[in-house]
Structures are given as structure tokens and as C-alpha cells.
Image: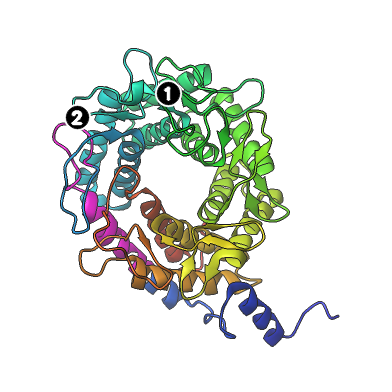
Amino acid sequence: MPILQPLATSLALLAVALCLPSTAAPAPTPQAYRELARQVDENLRKEILAKWFPAAIDPVGGFYQNFDEAWNHTGESAKSIVYQSRLTWLACQAAKRYPARAAEYRKAAAHGFDCLQHRMWDSRDGGFFWEIGPDGGPLRDGEKHAYGISFALYACSAYYRLTLDPAAKSLATRTFEWMEKHSHDTRNGGYYEALTRAGSPILTPPAASSGTDEIGTRYGFKSMNSHIHLLESLTEFYAVDPRPQVRARLEEVFKIVRDRVVVSQIGVMNQFFTPDWRPVPDLDSFGHDVETAFLLVEASSALGRPEDPAVWLAARRLVDHALEAGFDLAAGLADSGTTFRKVYIPERVWWVQAECVNALLLMHEKFGRETSRYWTAFTAEWEFIRSKQIDSVHGGWYNSVSPEGAAPAGAPKSDSWTEGYHQGRAMLRVSEVLQKLSAGREAR
């Protein structure tokens, strides 16, 4: 067989792999890149930033978490470290992106950082509470979790990079050192995840628990979810504090994600592990697959290896498998399924679509000269987001829609797990990359 197949045959194979029609998207032009960049930037400003800032700023401290379908504030019962950290991080990025409104976003970022420093940080035992009540006291017996602490490290590092406030660097450093002392697994690598208030790993389910911790991992086990976000936060912190100890921990988590979490031969990830990193079977999360593709490339670049072929191979296979197993041209990326291409949860969840469009552009940027596959999927995914994932009446992103784009009536727009981080990061990066591609410049 000739090395180069005829174009028609190549496009037919592409169509089968992606559930696409027989024609791929037109080759991108500078004008097409610029128009898409404009659309993405508009989405970022109107459907994300304008919905949370300044509406989410709670005068008492931190950010309001609960907004209904029409963006009415519905009252507060608690504040979670994940939500508070993610909105703080988003405000930092907005301040850098939009100089004309930097003062407004810097004020929001400072408000969020103040909450992290004075309300979410445990002044008695150190570390960040998972959740505090309206009175500021810790909930859930003061339980802590590496996933939440990781996002606090991410936010504090971003706030320092924005402001050079020494208090932010100090808190980020204390966070890293607290994790080193209490959460890092010196024997097996990686991190223990659920922790008592005093910082002891919770290795067996507490009597009153359901058996799983705050992110759905069985107590005592390790998760893909926590470790890909630890990779993310350590990458950000390394830009603030490039000490050898920080680099060593970043390298460690990077290798765990690349070599133990990712099954690069197939392009999937294991979700759960025993403490010594033996995988526990479960579903394949397509959204986390494409997100991790980006996070691996980002961390590899931070470590000085932006063109590491092993990293790009793993990242590409993660994206390829998600496309082949869960993507539909007319309906975006499904939530989850199996290694061998069976979709179990077909809903189109907001963060999955955001991570998908980001990863697809990353692949197009790197491999677009050899295949139109990623551009075709990117333009289809973006059109699905624009036409189905966005609420045309009240604005903002729907949390979840059916493959046909139907949203459940009355679903909230914001709660402790639903905020602007995933779609904010995606729109920030995608609009920037499209602008650079329109000018014929390398975006990385």
C-alpha cells in the first residue's frame, strides 16, 4: 500500500473515526482564526466574567456560590475551598487579560485571596478547610483534602504572579510545606488525599461516611482527579518558587500522571488507585482525558521540555481516544464511557466541552499541518458550545445538556462545584492561541 493514501480515503477514515460527514471543515484562514478568536473572547467577557464579577463578591468575605438559572443569588449555606480558589484564580487571569478593567478584577482577586488567607486557612492546624459555614467555622469536622488544597495553592500562586504581594507567596509556600509534611506519600509517591483537621491521612472510611470522600474517591485510595490538579497547581507554584524541592515534587507528580495514570498505548486514564498505585477499574472520564492532555504539555513546558515526544504522544492519544469513543460532530463530547468505546453517560457537561475545545486547539496547533482532524472537531465543538451549551435567555453556560442540546429546567448556574474556572481557562487560552495563529505565529 502506498505511504500516502488518496485524500478521499483519508477523509472517509476521518469521518468514521469522528462520526463526521464525508467533508472536513475548510482549512483555516487568518480571517477565520480572527473571527473565532473574537467569538471566544466575547464568550469569555459576556458569558463568564460578567456573570460572576462583581455579582459573586460577598461583602462578608469571599464569593457567593449559589445562583439560580436566571443568575439570582439564592443564599449561602457554606463556602468551599474549591469554589473560592477557582474564582480567585479566574479574577487574576481576567486582570491580566483586560488592562482596561484590571483594577476591577484585581479588587475581586484581592477579595478572594483575603478569604483564602483569613477564613479558609486553618490558623490552628494549618492547611485549608474543605468547607466553612456561614459563621466561618469549619464543617465536616474540619476535614481537608489534597484536591481542595491544591486549588488553593493554584490561586495563591496566581495572585502572587499578578500582584507580587509577599503575603501571597508566603501563603503559597506554607501551603506547599504543609502538604509536604502531612499529605505527601514518601514511600509510594504522590499524595494522600483525605486528611483530618490535624493533617493525618484518613485511610479507612469514617463510621458516619458513605465510604467515599468529598470528590468520590474511597477513603485511603488515590485518584486521577486529585493528581492531575496537583500537577496543575505545582506547575503554577513552580513559576513562583523554582527551588529544587518544588521542581522535584513537580517532576514526581508529572511522571505519576504520565506513566501511571495515563495508559498511553490506548489513550485512556485510570481513575482510582491503591496507595501503592495499583489501578482500580472504573469508567473512563473523557473530560479528564482531554484536560490532562493539556496539563501534561503545560507541565512539560514548565520543566523545560516543551517538545518532549513522549508527552506529546501521550497527550495526542488521550485526545484521539476521547474523539473516537465519545465525540459526535453535532453533539460535542460525552461525559464518560469505557476504554473500548462504549458511552455510559451521554450528557454534555459544561466543563467537559470547555476542556475539549481547549485540547482540540492544542492538537491543531501542534499537528494541524499533517491532519485536519483536530480543526474539524474544534470547529464542531465550538459550534455546539455556542448553539447549545450557552443559555440564550439568561446567559452563561448550562451545567449540563442532552446530546440534542436540551437543558433541564431550573438547573442552577452556579454552586459549590460549578463556577467559571474550566470555561474561563479554556476561553482565555483558546482566544489567545487563535489570535497568534491568525498572525502566523507559533502560539506556544
Assign the N terminus to one quadrant of the image: bottom right
Give SS at disc 2: loop
Quarter residue 34 falls in: bottom left
Q: Which residue is mark 2?
A: 134
Q: Position of residue 81 (x, y in %)?
A: 34, 33
Mark found first going from the N terminus, 2 or 1: 2
Residue 219 lies, with reference to residue 376, above or below; the image says above
Q: Nearer the viewer, residue 311 or 394?
A: 394
Quarter residue 70 falls in: bottom left
Q: Position of residue 174 (x, y in %)?
A: 42, 20
Residue at the (59%, 59%) spot, across then down: 319
Of the residues tagged 2 and 1, which is closer to the observer?
Answer: 2
Q: Which mark is residue 414?
A: none
- Whether residue 198 is visible, yes or no, is yes
Residue at the (50%, 33%) spot, across then down: 238
Residue at the (49%, 32%) spot, across then down: 211
Tell me the magenta residue range.
Answer: 37-64
Q: Which mark is residue 175?
A: 1
- Whether residue 442 is visible, yes or no, is no
The amino acid at mark 2 is Pro
- State how far apart marks 2 and 1 are (Cα): 24 Å
Quarter residue 324 falls in: bottom right
Q: Is 58 included in the stretch rendered in magenta?
A: yes
Q: Circles 2 and 1: CB distance less than 8 Å? A: no
- Circle 2 crowding by C-alpha within 10 Å: few under 14, some 14–19, many from 20: few
